[in-house]
Amino acid sequence: MRIAIGIYECFTSLDAMGPFQVLSSLPGAEVTFVAAKAGPVTDESGFLTVTARASFDELPDPDVLLVPGGITTGTLVPDHPIIGWIARAHPTTTWTTSVCSGALLLAAEIAGVEFARTLQLMMEYEPQPPFDAGSPAKAGPELVNRALTTMMQTMQQLAARRESFLEESDGRIAARRPG
């Protein structure tokens, strides 16, 4: 079974890697990351780069097509190559599926951009979580403050790691330059 996970710059890694972990364990599964062109594609954090082993054109008819979400999904419609790939591949798939905001890309292809935009506006994410703290109103001020503090610390840590990574990369690049 040929399974294609379509990725694009700034995709959400969990939306691709979670399904990859499960689907790659299926007997007879051949999971391939595909993108506009084969090669490296970086997730929204900027820290994870996944190698697309094929382009959309090189895997036009997978048995399973999966589209992960990402912070840029709203900018991909209608012109990004993934939209055309979904349109061409979907009629031949056994399953066409998505994770999170990747569903908007499928909706745009199936029912049009305006319909997908309308859905995006209308959606309210209200799962049935094990704890009833999924919104600031339900969580209360103490938990909201704790969450905000934790998010700020995480963002500062990520920014520092990214800065360190960029400095190390610049050093390696400079060391390779002649003269």
Image (cartoon, rainbow, N blue to C red):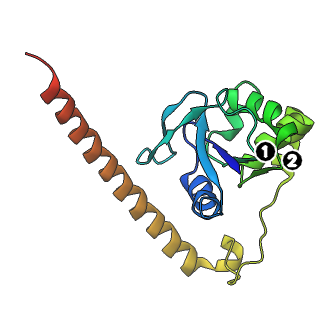
Question: Could you tell me residue 58's position as x and y percent?
Answer: 64, 29
Q: Which residue is drawn at 52% across and 45% down?
A: 44
Q: Where is residue 104 in the image (x, y as percent from the top left)?
A: 78, 44
Q: How many marks?
A: 2
From this viewpoint, which residue is outermost toward the top? 179
Residue furthest out toward the left: 179
Vertically, is 150 above or below 47?
below
Q: What residue type is labelled 1?
A: Leu
Q: Residue 82 is drawn in which quadrant?
A: top right
Residue at the spot of label 1: 104
Report the front residue among 18 and 170: 18
**Is residue 68 shown left or right of residue 110?**
left
| Residue matched to label 2 | 119
Distance in Å between CA atoms under marks 1 and 2: 8 Å
Asked if residue 29 is positioned above or below residue 141 in the image, the reply reads above
* Rendered residue at 68%/48% (across/down): 3
Q: Name the side, left or right, on which 122 lies relative to 143.
A: right
Horizontal and vertical percent position of residue 21: 57, 62
